[in-house]
Image (cartoon, rainbow, N blue to C red):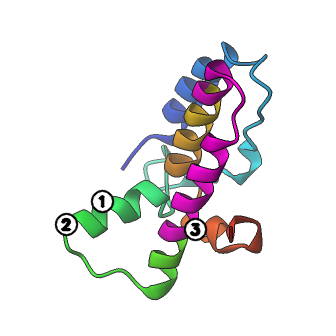
Amino acid sequence: MINILLLKHNFISILAGYKNANFVINMSKITTYQNSNSSNIKNFTSINDLRELDFTNVGLTPQERLALKNFDRYRIVQLNNQPSEKKFHAKYLQLQVMANLTPYQEFLKEDYFL
């Protein structure tokens, strides 16, 4: 399991250098749970988790495949809409964070149907 506190700290540190890049990460969507030994762990399935399952030929549900498809379309549209290289790199970093730290169910929402 991945220690979500360490991930949050690392991504926040990375993103601090991009505060003028005009994007926001909604940290309230990142959920942590306590396990029996009281360390915080990631306890949801992200887009990158689904990709890994798909690459290892583990069957995905139709909802999981739809979330992957929606995220990929969303990612391409967002990256293509960036007016400068600096904003492109900032958006790319934001999308990496989303793929790692957002439950895949988020990408089943209508906002991501492009």
Q: Does residue 86 belong to the magenta stretch?
A: yes
Numbered circle sitting on residue 52: 1
For the residues bearing labels 2 and 1, Cβ distance under 8 angstroms: yes
Sequence-wise first label, 3 or 2:
2
Q: Nearer the viewer, residue 37 or 88?
A: 88
Looking at the magenta stretch, what is its main secondary structure? helix
* Residue position for label 3: 70
- Identify which amino acid the numbered label 2 is placed on: Thr
* Residue position for label 2: 56
Looking at the rendered image, the disc whose residue lies closer to the viewer, 3 or 2, is 3
What stretch of residues is rendered in magenta? 68-89
Which residue is painted at 30% across and 59% down in the image? Answer: 52
Q: Position of residue 56 (x, y in %)?
A: 19, 66
Residue at the top extreme, as displayed = 17
Q: Nearer the viewer, residue 103 or 83?
A: 83
Q: Secondary structure at mark 1?
A: helix
The C terminus, quarter of image: bottom right
Q: Is residue 114 left or right of residue 66?
A: right
Question: For the residue carrying disc 2, how many other residues have a C-alpha within 10 Å: few (<14), some (14-19), or many (20+)?
Answer: few
Q: Is residue 60 left or right of residue 103?
A: left
Sequence-wise first label, 3 or 1:
1
| Residue 32 seen | no
Q: Nearer the viewer, residue 34 or 107?
A: 107
Q: Does residue 14 belong to the magenta stretch?
A: no
